[in-house]
């Protein structure tokens, strides 16, 4: 009898231990509205060769995930089959390392990049896509740094050749990429920034460095810019697509650069509208080489997801971004921090353009900080 009790006790302990090796994850069960997001318990993964296991503290929310939820996001090889975990960036602590990994070591606070799969309590990530969080940077800031600042940095410096005396139009200037781009523009002397945003966000984007805020809801940004600069601007960052892309191209000065990096005009409601997708696609111009040659303008397309294998490029850019943070030249603006249990509300915050800065997700109740009322 005593032996049986002992055996039952040990079996119970083993079962409990197995149950403890599980985690919470937010999964996308299909493409559509907010109801397609569910929280589910999954086994904690083991890091494979070249990977580290990270205990996720915070994750960033990006327009890419909004597009992904609607089935509009494009990546090499296509989206994973549902259900799967979204999430391209996170910040956390290394718990375990796979074979062949020298750095980072267990206990290191890291910023991580991945194709998907970071909306979990634990995530296995390639070691080469992890960057040590500098001293003084919070987990919230770390989750706001990778996607937005990499996107802005590579567009402005690698494509845009940003330099002294340049003028830049930043659409959606109060969003995560918009604020990152504005701050990076301030690291170069005498750069003039025009920014589109709702009127109630103008004070904030002025503080960030936008010299000429434009209320895109009630004004034509092309008309407003030409009042100040009749010849237009040198660089335009276009996350909108559709008919706005042609307007942005027309706004370029000779030798100007248009950089298209999104299609926000496709998303006008909670669910995907194929009519709206088709309308945006139809209104998006095609640029011929002769046309650009005769006008002395260039058009570039940027998609961070298609640079996943460019390790050296991303590492160099990320290291420079961290250096700028440590030097006090840039600092992420956090709009709000939501618990993953409230992922739908967090998505609404961004989808309805209510955010001023980065929307961050967390598994830690202590970090939750809802947005101030606008």
Image (cartoon, rainbow, N blue to C red):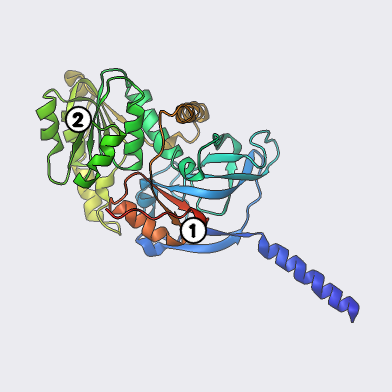
The residue drawn where x is 53% and y is 58% is: 25
Residue 33: quadrant of the picture: bottom left
Question: Horizontal placement of 182 versus 8: left or right?
Answer: left
The CA distance from mark 1 to mark 2 is 39 Å
* Identity of the residue furthest to the bottom in this view: 1
Q: Is 78 in front, or is 357?
A: 357
User: Which residue is located at x 71 percent, y 67 percent?
Assistant: 16
Q: Secondary structure at mark 1?
A: strand
Which comes sooner in the sequence, label 1 or label 2? 1
Q: Is residue 359 left or right of residue 258?
A: right
Q: Is residue 32 left or right of residue 169?
A: right
| Residue 305 appearing in the image | no
Residue at disc 2, secondary structure: helix
For disc 1, the marked residue is: 26
Q: Is residue 269 above or below residue 90?
A: below
Q: On screen, 164 above or below 352?
A: above
The picture places residue 36, in percent across and down from the top left corner, at: 40, 62
Determine crowd level at label 2: few under 14, some 14-19, many 20+ residues with C-alpha closer than 10 A: many
Residue 182 image point, x, y percent: 31, 32
Can you see residue 334?
yes
Q: Residue 223: name its quadrant.
A: top left
Residue 208 screen position, x and y as percent: 31, 35
Question: How far across and how far down the image is residue 53, in percent?
Answer: 63, 46
């Amino acid at each position: 009898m005593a032996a049986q009790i002992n055996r039952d006790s040990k079996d119970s302990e083993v079962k409990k231990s197995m149950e403890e090796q599980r985690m919470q994850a937010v999964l996308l069960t299909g493409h559509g509205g907010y109801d397609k997001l569910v929280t589910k318990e999954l086994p904690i993964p083991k890091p494979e060769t070249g990977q580290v296991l990270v205990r996720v503290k915070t994750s960033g929310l990006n327009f890419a995930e909004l597009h992904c939820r609607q089935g509009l996001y494009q990546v090499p090889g296509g989206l994973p089959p549902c259900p799967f975990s979204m999430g391209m960036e996170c910040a956390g602590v290394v718990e375990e390392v796979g074979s062949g990994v020298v750095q980072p070591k267990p206990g290191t606070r890291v910023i991580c990049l991945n194709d998907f799969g970071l909306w979990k309590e634990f995530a296995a990530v390639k070691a080469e896509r992890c960057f040590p969080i500098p001293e003084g940077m919070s987990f919230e800031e770390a989750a706001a740094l990778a996607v937005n600042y990499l996107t802005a940095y590579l567009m402005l410096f690698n494509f845009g050749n940003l330099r002294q005396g340049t003028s830049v139009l930043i659409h959606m200037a109060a969003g995560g990429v918009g604020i990152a781009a504005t701050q990076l523009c301030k690291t170069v002397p005498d750069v003039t920034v025009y920014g589109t945003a709702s009127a109630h966000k103008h004070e904030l984007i002025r503080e960030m460095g936008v010299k000429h805020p434009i209320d895109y809801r009630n004004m034509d940004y092309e008309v407003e810019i030409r009042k100040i600069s009749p010849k237009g601007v040198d660089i335009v960052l276009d996350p909108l697509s559709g008919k706005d892309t042609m307007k942005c191209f027309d706004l370029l000065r000779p030798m100007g650069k248009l950089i298209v990096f999104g299609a926000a005009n496709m998303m006008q409601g909670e669910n995907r509208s194929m009519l709206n997708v088709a309308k945006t696609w139809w209104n998006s111009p095609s640029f011929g080489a002769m046309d650009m040659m005769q006008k002395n303008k260039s058009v570039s397309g940027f998609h961070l997801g298609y640079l996943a294998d460019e390790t050296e490029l991303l590492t160099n850019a990320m290291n420079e971004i961290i250096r700028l943070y440590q030097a006090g030249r840039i600092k992420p603006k956090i709009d709000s921090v939501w618990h993953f249990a409230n992922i739908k509300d967090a998505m609404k915050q961004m989808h309805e353009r209510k955010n001023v800065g980065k929307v961050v997700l967390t598994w830690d109740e202590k970090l939750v900080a809802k947005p101030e009322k606008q």
